Image (cartoon, coloured by chain):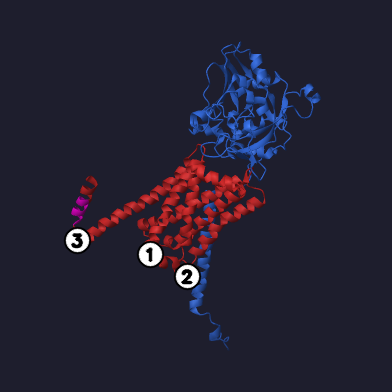
C-alpha cells in the first residue's frame, strides 16, 4: 500500500505564521470590540447621557378642538390685524422643540415625556380681586369666547424664535367678564403642581409650581392670548395643554403653560425665572435687543428652520401695539 | 501603529474616536439634528471636547492608582482628539452660528465671560497640539515640554466653567464632568506629596521624622 505523499516541506505553514494567524484574529476581535465601545461611549456622552433614540415616539395626532367654530371667524379676513405674514414654523418643530421643565430640561424632553399629563378633565380656578371667584372647567371656559387664530412670533430668551399659529381668546375678554375690583393691579398665573403628571417637578430645578404674572394694563392688551390650540388643533401636552398664556412681545418663558389658577392681585406677583435668577430674568422680560442677557447677546436670534441669524426687534416687533405701556420706564432697569 | 503589546489599542481608539463626527455629519446631512441643528452640533462637539480632555488627563492618574501603562500610550491621541473636537466646536460657532460675523464674534469673546472662557480654553490647546510631536518634545526638552503641557489642566477647568455658564439652570451635567476632573486632579496632588514623602524616606530620613516634618510645615 502506498501512503499519500507527504506535503512538501515548503507547503507546511510555518509555526510562527500559524501562531500569528491566531494572534491576528484575537487582535482583530479586540480591535473591533474596543472601537465599538469607544464609539458608542462617546456617542452616548455627546448626546447628553441619553440612550440613542433618533426619533421621538409617534404621538397620536391631536384631535380637532372641540369648541364649535365661531361663525364670525369665517367672515373675518384670512389674516388678522395682528398676524405676521412670515412663514410659519413647521408643526413638527413647534411640537418637538420646547422648554417645559416640568417634563425635563432638554428641548426634546417635553415631546417625549408629556404623555403623562392629563389635560381633561381640567378646571381653572379664577380668584382674587374679582366679583365672583369660581372654578370653571376648561371646556366651559373656552366656550365663553369665540376662538381666534393668531399667527405670532415667539422669541425665546435663549435667542431662538418661531412663528406659531395659535388658537385662543384674548385674556382681556376673560378679565372683563370677571369684573375685577379697583384693587386688581396685576394678574398672577399658576401651573399645575402634580409630580405624577409632571415628573420633572420631582427635581428641584425650579421652585414648583411655575408661576408668572402681568401688570393689569399689559394683561388687557389685545395681543395677549389664552391659547387652547395651535395649527387649528388642540394644544399638544408639550405646548402647555389644555390652556396656556401667549404674550408675543415678551420672552417665551412668560408664556406659562398648563394653567390651573388665574388670580387678580394688588401686588406684583412673584415669577418663577425671576426667583431662580433675579439678575438674569426680570418681571417684565420684554424682548429687547439692547438689553443683553448677562451671559449672551439678545441682539440677534435664530429663527428655527433658518440658517442665518436675524436681528431681534424691540418688543419682538410689536412695539406699535405695546411700547406705550412702558413710556417713561427705564427698560434697562426693568428688564 | 500596529506594534508592541496591545497592537489593536491605538487603531481601535483612533477609529472609535472618529465615530461621533461621522454620526454627526450623517445626521446633519439627513436633517436629523432636530429643530435647531446648529445648537445640537455645538452641544455635541463641546461635550466631546470635554470628554477627550478629561480622558487625556485620566491617563496619568490611572497609572498612579492602578499601575496601568496602556492609557499613557493613547494619551497623546486623546489630547489631539480633544483639540480636533474643540476646533470643530469653535468652527461651528464662528462659521455656522455666527456666519463669520467677526464683529459679533469679537463682541461675544470680549463681553461674555461664558464665551471668553471657552475661547481661552481653545486657545490654550493650540500650543499643546503644536508641540505634540516627538520632535517638539526633544526640541523643548522634556522638562519644559511637560511644564507647558500642564496647561491642559487649566484648559479642562475652563472647559467645565464654560459648560456651567452655558446651562440655564440644571447644572447636574457640568457638575458631573467637573467632579470627575476634580478627582483626577486631586489624584495627582496626592501622588505628588506621596512621592515627596517616599523620596525623603529613601534618602534615609526616618519615616516618622519625615511625617513630623510635614506636620510642622503645615502647622507653621
In the image, which residues are magenta? B206-213
Numbered mark located on residue A331 in the image: none
> x, y percentage for residue A120?
64, 25
Dot 1 or dot 2: first in sequence order is 2
| Host chain of mark 1 | B
Where, quadrant-wise, is the C terminus of chain A in this rendering? top right
> x, y percentage for residue B41?
59, 48
Dot 3 or dot 2: first in sequence order is 2
* Chain letter, colour blue in render: A
> x, y percentage for residue B134?
44, 67
- The verdict on a common chain for dots 3 and 2 is yes
Q: Which residue is mark 1?
A: B142
Q: Front-most of B213 and B55? A: B213
Q: Which residue is mark 2?
A: B3
Most extreme residue toward the front is: A328
Distance from disc 1 to disc 3, alpha carbons, whole Å, reads 29 Å
Please tell me how crowded label 1 is: few (under 14), some (14-19), or many (20+) other residues with Cα within 10 Å.
few
Q: Front-most of A11 and B31? A: B31
- The verdict on a common chain for dots 1 and 3 is yes
Q: Residue at x 52, y 61 (%)?
A: B14
Q: Are marks 3 and 2 in contact (CB under 8 Å)?
A: no
| Host chain of mark 3 | B
Q: Is residue A53 visible to the viewer in this orientation of the structure? A: no
* Magenta residue check for B198: no
Distance from disc 1 to disc 2, alpha carbons, whole Å, reads 24 Å
Q: Which residue is mark 3?
A: B204
Dot 1 or dot 3: first in sequence order is 1
- The verdict on a common chain for dots 1 and 2 is yes
Distance from disc 3 to disc 2, alpha carbons, whole Å, reads 42 Å
Amino acid at each position: 500500500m502506498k501512503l499519500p505523499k507527504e506535503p512538501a516541506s515548503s507547503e507546511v505553514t510555518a509555526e510562527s505564521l500559524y501562531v500569528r494567524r491566531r494572534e491576528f484574529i484575537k487582535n482583530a476581535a479586540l480591535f473591533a470590540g474596543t472601537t465599538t465601545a469607544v464609539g458608542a461611549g462617546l456617542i452616548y456622552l455627546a448626546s447628553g447621557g441619553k440612550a440613542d433614540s433618533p426619533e421621538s415616539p409617534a404621538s397620536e395626532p391631536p384631535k380637532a378642538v372641540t369648541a364649535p367654530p365661531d361663525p364670525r371667524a369665517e367672515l373675518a379676513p384670512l389674516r388678522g390685524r395682528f398676524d405676521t405674514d412670515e412663514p410659519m414654523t413647521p408643526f413638527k418643530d413647534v411640537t418637538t422643540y420646547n422648554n417645559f421643565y416640568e417634563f425635563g430640561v432638554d428641548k426634546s424632553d417635553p415631546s417625549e415625556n408629556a404623555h403623562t399629563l392629563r389635560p381633561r378633565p381640567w378646571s381653572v380656578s379664577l380668584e382674587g380681586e374679582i366679583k365672583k371667584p369660581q372654578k370653571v372647567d376648561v371646556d366651559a371656559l373656552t366656550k365663553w369666547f369665540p376662538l381666534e387664530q393668531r399667527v405670532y412670533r415667539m422669541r425665546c430668551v435663549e435667542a431662538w424664535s418661531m412663528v406659531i399659529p395659535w388658537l385662543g381668546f384674548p385674556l382681556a375678554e376673560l378679565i372683563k367678564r370677571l369684573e375685577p375690583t379697583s384693587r386688581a393691579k396685576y394678574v398672577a398665573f399658576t401651573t399645575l403642581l402634580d409630580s405624577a403628571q409632571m415628573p420633572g417637578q420631582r427635581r428641584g430645578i425650579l421652585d414648583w409650581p411655575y408661576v408668572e404674572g402681568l401688570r393689569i394694563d399689559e394683561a388687557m392688551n389685545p395681543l395677549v392670548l389664552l391659547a387652547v390650540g395651535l395649527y387649528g388643533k388642540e394644544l399638544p401636552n408639550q405646548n402647555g395643554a389644555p390652556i396656556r398664556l401667549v404674550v408675543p412681545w415678551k420672552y417665551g418663558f412668560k408664556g406659562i403653560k398648563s394653567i390651573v389658577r388665574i388670580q387678580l392681585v394688588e401686588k406684583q406677583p412673584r415669577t418663577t425665572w425671576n426667583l431662580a435668577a433675579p439678575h438674569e430674568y426680570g418681571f417684565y422680560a420684554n424682548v429687547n435687543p439692547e438689553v443683553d442677557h448677562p451671559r449672551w447677546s439678545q441682539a440677534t436670534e435664530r429663527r428655527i428652520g433658518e440658517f442665518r441669524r436675524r436681528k431681534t426687534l424691540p418688543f419682538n416687533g410689536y412695539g406699535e401695539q405695546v411700547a406705550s405701556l412702558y413710556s417713561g420706564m427705564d427698560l434697562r432697569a426693568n428688564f | 501603529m500596529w506594534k508592541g503589546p496591545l497592537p489593536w489599542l491605538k487603531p481601535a481608539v483612533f477609529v472609535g474616536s472618529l465615530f461621533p463626527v461621522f454620526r454627526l455629519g450623517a445626521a446633519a446631512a439627513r436633517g436629523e439634528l432636530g429643530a435647531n441643528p446648529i445648537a445640537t452640533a455645538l452641544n455635541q462637539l463641546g461635550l466631546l471636547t470635554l470628554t477627550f480632555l478629561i480622558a487625556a488627563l485620566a491617563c496619568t492618574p490611572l497609572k498612579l492608582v492602578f499601575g496601568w501603562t496602556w492609557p499613557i500610550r493613547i494619551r497623546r491621541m486623546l489630547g489631539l482628539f480633544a483639540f480636533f473636537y474643540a476646533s470643530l466646536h469653535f468652527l461651528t460657532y464662528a462659521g455656522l452660528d455666527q456666519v463669520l460675523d467677526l464683529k459679533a464674534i469679537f463682541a461675544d469673546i470680549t463681553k461674555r465671560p461664558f464665551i471668553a472662557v471657552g475661547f481661552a480654553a481653545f486657545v490654550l490647546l493650540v500650543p499643546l497640539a503644536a508641540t505634540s510631536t516627538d520632535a517638539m518634545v526633544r526640541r523643548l526638552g522634556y522638562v519644559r515640554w511637560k511644564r507647558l503641557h500642564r496647561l491642559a489642566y487649566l484648559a479642562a477647568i475652563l472647559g467645565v466653567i464654560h459648560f456651567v455658564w452655558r446651562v440655564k439652570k440644571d447644572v447636574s451635567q457640568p457638575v458631573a464632568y467637573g467632579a470627575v476632573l476634580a478627582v483626577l486632579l486631586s489624584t495627582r496632588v496626592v501622588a505628588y506629596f506621596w512621592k515627596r514623602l517616599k523620596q525623603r524616606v529613601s534618602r534615609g530620613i526616618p519615616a516618622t521624622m519625615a511625617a513630623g516634618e510635614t506636620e510642622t510645615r503645615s502647622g507653621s
